[in-house]
Image: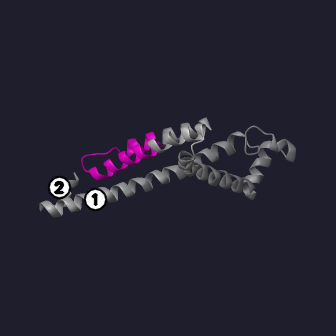
Amino acid sequence: MVLGVAFFIALYTLFSHWTYPSEKSSALWRRAMRLATWIRTVWAILALPGLMLGNKALKVMFSVDLIAGMIATSLTYFIGKFPPVGWVRIMIAGPDANQRRHHVLVGDMDSLLPTFLTTVIEGFILSGLLFCIAFVCLWAFAFRARRAAKSSGLPASVLGT
């Protein structure tokens, strides 16, 4: 799991390096991503006490992470049952099913590669959620800039930057 988190830290670092916001990029998009990140961070921080204290309203906030984890686990399980993956498992861990099940690298769901794959899939699902929140924020910022432009008589591109 730690490897999956480290993978996403490296991926986001490379992604932010390649897409570093320049003067040409949209200021509205930068603001939307920043706000979406804050929303998702506060969301996750509020979900933790809900789990620990048993607050039902805050537990609902954790349901998004729970569902993402369930989908990621199901996809990893499905991928593990796919014949080519099964053949690779046999090549790595041997022909004995009991021996394969307890293999550290490619065993059941609690071994290294399935756990890593589950973490990465869940990370992509939660990143998709972050981008959806960012697009809603971008829409709201653009709507607000158009309304302000209409009332002031200035072009929306002037107010959006």
- Toward the left, the furthest residue is 153
- Toward the bottom, the furthest residue is 150
Query: Which one is nearer the viewer's eye here, 84 or 81?
Result: 81
Q: Of helix, strand and loop, which one carries label 1? A: helix
Q: Main secondary structure of the magenta part?
A: helix
Query: Which one is nearer the viewer's eye here, 80 or 139?
Result: 139
Q: Position of residue 126 (x, y in %)?
A: 52, 50
Q: Residue at x 36, y 45 (%)?
A: 34
Q: The residue under label 1 is which amino acid type?
A: Ala
Residue 2: image quadrant is top right
Instruction: State whether residue 25 appears in this view.
Output: no
Q: Badge 2: few (under 14), some or many (20 or more) residues near its Cα, within 10 Å?
A: few
Disc number placed over residue 61 in the picture, else none: none
Q: The residue under label 2 is which amino acid type?
A: Val
Q: Position of residue 96 (x, y in %)?
A: 87, 46
Badge 1 is on which residue? 142
Is residue 67 positioned above or below 3 on the image? below
Q: Of helix, strand and loop, which one carries label 2? A: helix
Q: Residue at x 44, y 39 (%)?
A: 13
Callout 1 touching callout 2 (CB < 8 Å): no
Instruction: State whether residue 43 appears in this view.
Output: yes
First-in-chain label (1 vs 2): 1
Query: Which one is nearer the viewer's eye here, 105 or 115?
Result: 115
Q: CA distance from mark 1 to mark 2?
A: 12 Å
Badge 2 is on which residue? 158
Q: Is residue 23 one of those drawn in magenta?
A: yes
Q: Which residues are magenta?
A: 12-41
Residue 98: image quadrant is top right
Query: Which one is nearer the viewer's eye here, 127 or 36?
Result: 36
Closer mark to the observer between disc 1 and disc 2: 1
User: In what quadrant of the picture does the N terminus appear?
Assistant: top right
- Name the colouring of the figure: one colour
